[in-house]
Amino acid sequence: MVFVSKKNTLQKTYIFSITRIATLLLVLFSFSVSAQSAKDFYNRGVDKANAGDIKGAVSAFDEAIRLDPQNAIYYYNRGTAKFYLNDFKSAIADLDNAASIEPNDSRIYSNRGAARLSMDDPKGAIFDFDKAIKLDANSARDYFMRGQAKIGLTDKTGGCDDLHKAKELGHKHAQEYIDQYCNDSIADLRLSKKSEYLRLDWPDAEGWKMASNNVAGEMQTVELLRNNENFENWTEIGTMIVYSSPGPLPPIEEAMKFMVDQAKSSCPNAVATQIEKDEKAEYPWIIFKIECNAEMPESQVWQIIEGKQDMFINFRAVKQKKVPEDLKTKWVKFFKTAKIQKS
């Protein structure tokens, strides 16, 4: 949170209940000032704040507001100072007044959202960050803070989307939070020059961890393992692939045939069975299984989704001759949660 004046700046980092770090950058903005004496108190308040005398700043802003009660900048700065003093309820009241006078400045809602988040009101905070982002769609800070609020409400998908957006906009702490809250449970495939990606949330309760992430030519492959298993002793493995074709993408059934042929090259008696498909969806998809009854059996349930630019391929496998019916039902339901999103 920063007071800006002709002299110095003062910045402070706060610890919120659902995060380790949240940095607020509050920048003063200008409105016309009609009463010179009120302006004098306002300038005195900014000087005191930059000198670290926050209580003195509040007193000076009190006088500025008494003399000129229709100036949004005075309420904005007093609310900022009260935030520093952990008087979040009063800070919100001042920011309410600032918003009623100047309703189109995103920074007012950003600060009010931070105050609400500090009061353990993530729903209220999200409401304010929504308004701030609507007014300023390039605010890395607001995406970063809204992402934290969503994660606090167990909306991990929405929260991680916001953290990724904050990272794209240059927020210096975003990757730290992505590593903490997102990467352990979400395989998020993004080729650097593409505007679409697949999101598929691998359940935390199942102990999934990303084991590898490799790019070779036009293909990126992420492999996931469970419960501290490794590639030698795994009992269940997950794989996500994105294929970026230099030309038109193949139909989903042709892509399925290719995968089946690949499987038969190492297991000639492999049996493929189509489970479900939807060729009329916005992003056509097909789900099928491949079962290999061999000396070292392995059976898989696959999903192929055709994006506008890329082909997304996912599968889960077990070391069994056939996929048990309960696992097939579970995996099909899981794959249907996959969503193509735009960055």
Image (cartoon, grey):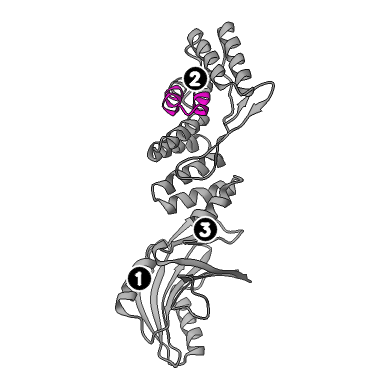
- The residue at which mark 1 appears reads as 332
| Upstream in sequence: badge 1 or badge 3 | 3
Q: Is residue 122 magenta?
A: no
**Which type of secondary structure does the marked residue at label 3 adopt?**
strand
Residue range in magenta is 79-96
Distance between the alpha carbons at the discs numbered 2 and 3: 42 Å
Residues packed near mark 1 inside 10 Å, few (<14), some (14 to 19) or many (20 plus): some
What residue sits 40% from the left and 72% below the top? 286
Q: Amino acid at mark 1?
A: Val
Residue 324 screen position, x and y as percent: 32, 80
Image: 291 above or below 42: below
Which mark, by number, is residue 196?
A: 3
Residue 95 is covered by the magenta coloring: yes
**Left or right: residue 322 compared with residue 40:** left
Relative to 159, is 32 above or below? above
Q: Residue type at mark 3?
A: Glu
Number of numbered discs on residues? 3
Q: Is residue 247 visible?
A: no
Residue wearing tag 2: 75
Q: Can you give x and y, in whole percent of width and height, for residue 23 in the image?
A: 56, 38
* Cα gap from disc 1 to disc 3, whole angstroms: 23 Å
Which image quarter is the N terminus in? top right
Name which residue lies at 59% across and 49% down: 168
Q: CA distance from mark 2 to mark 1?
A: 54 Å
Upstream in the sequence, badge 2 or badge 3? 2
* Number of the front mark, 1 or 3: 1
Q: Nearer the viewer, residue 178 or 58?
A: 58
Query: For residue 120, what is the image quadrant?
Result: top left
Residue at the image point whose x is 52% and y is 28% from the top: 84
Residue 197 drawn above or below residue 35: below
Marks 1 and 3: CB-CB under 8 Å? no
